[in-house]
Amino acid sequence: MSSKPNTTSPLKPIANESYILPGFATAKTNALLTAIEGVIQVAPLRQMHTPGGFKMAAQLTNCGKYGWVTDSHGYRYQTTDPETNLSWPTMPELIHQLALEAASACGFAHFKPDVCLINCYQPGAGMGLHQDKDEKDFSAPIVSVSLGVPAIFLFGGAKRQDKPSAYLLKNGDVVVWGGEDRLRFHGVQPIKLAHHPMTGQKRFNLTIRQAA
Ligand SMILES: O=C(O)CCC(=O)C(=O)O
Ligand SMILES: [Fe+2]
């Protein structure tokens, strides 16, 4: 359960326990992208397959104690990168700290993030409506950081059929959802062709989570 939001920066509520924090990470864009680059050098971006055999549109990698993976055996978290059998790179402190601050600003005080999933979207790539439900403890929120070209984020309800609302997410915007909203369906519309000075045509998204 979250207590009252605790912040001096603007919070845009999108549900009872869900917020967009516009520009919360913008000042850290360069450092975040440098940190992501370091992760990608050790654990390269790759396209994974869903259990049903479809290729995910976004490329992904992870850092932290755990990483989220998907293949013919299902969706899960594991401590090693299936490509290299090495441990995932350590979560950069900058990302860890940002996630704690964003969660705390939204009233989620006891967040212990142990995974950062890094998604990389090229123009045309999106993500269908889904729930983040492979984590053990749904009392921990999800913190999602957008970098690079903009995206339309879809935030729905508890049921797949619930009509989602659409929100424009720009470089540096952060979304936090948890508590009663933790299992809301969400997704990303196919990314439009655009240019960002730091990422070119790409959008990166970090979802910082507590897997265990
Ligand atoms: O890219 C985004 O904004 C959302 C990503 C997401 O929902 C996920 O990786 O589970
Ligand atoms: Fe998600």
Image (tube, helix red, strand yellow):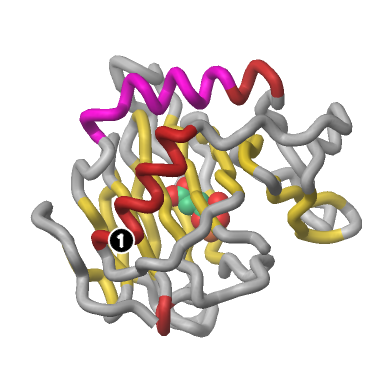
Q: Secondary structure at mark 1?
A: helix
Which residue is more in the foreground, 22 or 108? 108
Q: Tell me residue 204's x, y (percent).
A: 46, 34
> Viewed as shown, does residue 109 lie left or right of 56?
left
Q: Tell me residue 28's x, y (percent).
A: 29, 29
Q: Quadrant of the C terminus?
A: bottom right
User: Residue placed at 24% from the left, 60% from the top?
Assistant: 105
Asked if 79 appears above or below 201 in the picture, the reply is below
> Viewed as shown, does residue 66 lie left or right of 171?
right
Which residue is more in the foreground, 197 or 1? 1
User: Residue placed at 89% from the left, 54% from the top?
Assistant: 72
Q: Quadrant of residue 85?
A: top right
Q: Quadrant of residue 46?
A: top right
Which residue is more in the foreground, 11 or 165? 11
In this figure, what is the number of numbered marks? 1
User: Residue placed at 28% from the left, 57% from the top?
Assistant: 167
> Viewed as shown, does residue 109 lie left or right of 96?
left
Q: Amino acid at mark 1?
A: Ser
User: Over which residues does the magenta segment extend?
Assistant: 26-38
The crowding category of the residue bearing disc 1, from other C-alpha atoms within 10 Å (few below 14, some 14 to 19, many at least 20), is many
> Viewed as shown, does residue 178 lie left or right of 124?
left
Q: What secondary structure is the magenta-colored segment mainly?
A: helix
Q: Quadrant of residue 15?
A: bottom left
Asked if 144 appears above or below 36 in the picture, the reply is below
Q: Which residue is mark 1?
A: 104
